[in-house]
Each structure stands twice: as C-alpha cells, then as structure tokens.
Image (cartoon, rainbow, N blue to C red):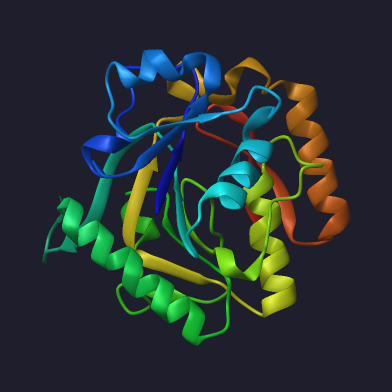
Amino acid sequence: MIAIPSKGRAGKVKSTKYLPTATLFVPEYEEDAYRAFHENVTAVPSDVIGITQTRNWILDNAGNDSVVMVDDDVKSAGWLKLNQHNAKAVKLTPDEWLKECSTLFDLTRSLKYRLWGIATQAALRSVYPYKPLLWRSYVTASFCGICNESGIRFDEAYRVKEDYELNLRCLKEDGGVVAARYLFWQNSHWGDEGGCRDYRTTEVEQDAISRLQAAYPGIVRKVDRGGSEYSIELNF
C-alpha cells in the first residue's frame, strides 16, 4: 500500500501524478473536498490529531504488511543519469515506482531491517554512484517503506520530526536501514500551504529537536538550510 497523508490540499496534491494508485488519508471533515479530485480517499477520524498520530492510524488500519509513506507535495522524483559533463533527471513510470518499492521491501526484510527510504533531494551531491545503497543513513517519511508486520510505530511524543526519531530508533535497534540513494523524491515542504504548517511553530520544532538530541546524543545537529531554522543533520 502507498499511503499519502494530506491536509488542507484538496485539488493541490502533486504526488498522485507519480503514484495514481496511492490512497490519500485525509481528515474526515475534508473527505468530500478531496473526493472531488481523487478516487482513492480514506477519512481519518477527527480525534486523530497531527501528522504523527495520523501516520500511526494509517499503519494500524492499513491491513497491509508493506506500507509506503509518501508526502503529498512532491516537486520532482526519479533518478539522476550521470553523463560525462552533466546530469539529467529521469522520471519513473507508476509501474516502475511500484516495482522499486517491492524490491526495497524484499531487500529490507532479507536484512531483517524494518525501514527503508530514498533520497529527499535531487542535488548531484546526494548521488552515490558507487554506493547506491547505504545501511547507516537518514530515511525520512517524505518517501519511506515500513514493514508493518513488525509492529513498529512512530513515537507520538514527537509532533514533528517523528520520522527522524523512527530512523534513529531503527538504526539503534536493528543495526541499520535500507537507504536507496539511486532514487530521489524531492518535496516542497515549506513552500505549500496546508499540511503541518498550522501547528509547526518554533516551539514545537525546538521541542522535537531537543528530544532527539537527548535521546540520541552526539548524532543530531541543528543546521540552517534553505531559509529554514528547523533543519537538522544526522552524524553517522
């Protein structure tokens, strides 16, 4: 199952252009608005508050052992073809995306891991031609696969950056994750209205960063990137 949590973006979801069979999980009071534009829509009860609880509700109700979480605001996606003097972004078809997801789930389970993900930017510096797969790297819920039969869930103490916590927990408990750096899924995040923006305040972000730094000392570092004061880097 490919699950796309979404809020406040009826008619503006971009990720279904790449993944037309994905299911949108939206607040129940927005269900009708989303159904006007999308066929596969599931309403999330109103007592499920915030993205972290929403992700866990999806996992609890997916009825599927293989759940791919995808953000709804993709800008570009695919893989980078490196030529002698330049590089070109190559798009995948919907069927190719599904095949890649299936392959990454098989690999993750064969390694007895629970989590996989792909790169979140299309910059050349993020491409590892000789290391297409990394075992100790960052994985975010911009595009990640969760082996749902494992019962792993996001920590609801984190209203934001819940995916970083899950990433670090899997590294600590499992010894690794599957980070597929030969694919990328780049999102808008700060540029689009809707989503988590209605509660993503400085205080909420700082609380999440402080929790991560306390739980995983020496690994989490706060940085300024792209005009955002909420960015962090993971030191491996």
Left or right of 2: which side holds 115? Answer: right
- In the picture, the quarter occupied by the C terminus is bottom right
How many discs appear? Answer: 0
Q: Nearer the viewer, residue 103 or 142?
A: 103
Q: Is residue 73 above or below residue 163?
A: above
x, y percentage for residue 162?
68, 46
Q: Quadrant of residue 128?
A: bottom left
Q: Is residue 216 above or below residue 10?
A: below
Can residue 233 be seen here? The reply is yes
Question: Residue placed at 40% from the left, 68% from the top?
Answer: 180
- Residue farthest to the right? 214
Question: Residue placed at 58% from the left, 71% from the top?
Answer: 114
Q: Quadrant of residue 101?
A: bottom left
- Residue farthest to the left? 84
- In the picture, the quarter occupied by the N terminus is bottom left
Q: Nearer the viewer, residue 67 or 103?
A: 67
Left or right of 220: which side holds 40? Answer: left
Q: Nearer the viewer, residue 122 or 78?
A: 78
x, y percentage for residue 48?
68, 30
Question: Residue placed at 42% from the left, 72% from the top?
Answer: 105
Q: Nearer the viewer, residue 227 or 161?
A: 161
Can residue 236 be seen here? The reply is no
x, y percentage for residue 108?
48, 77
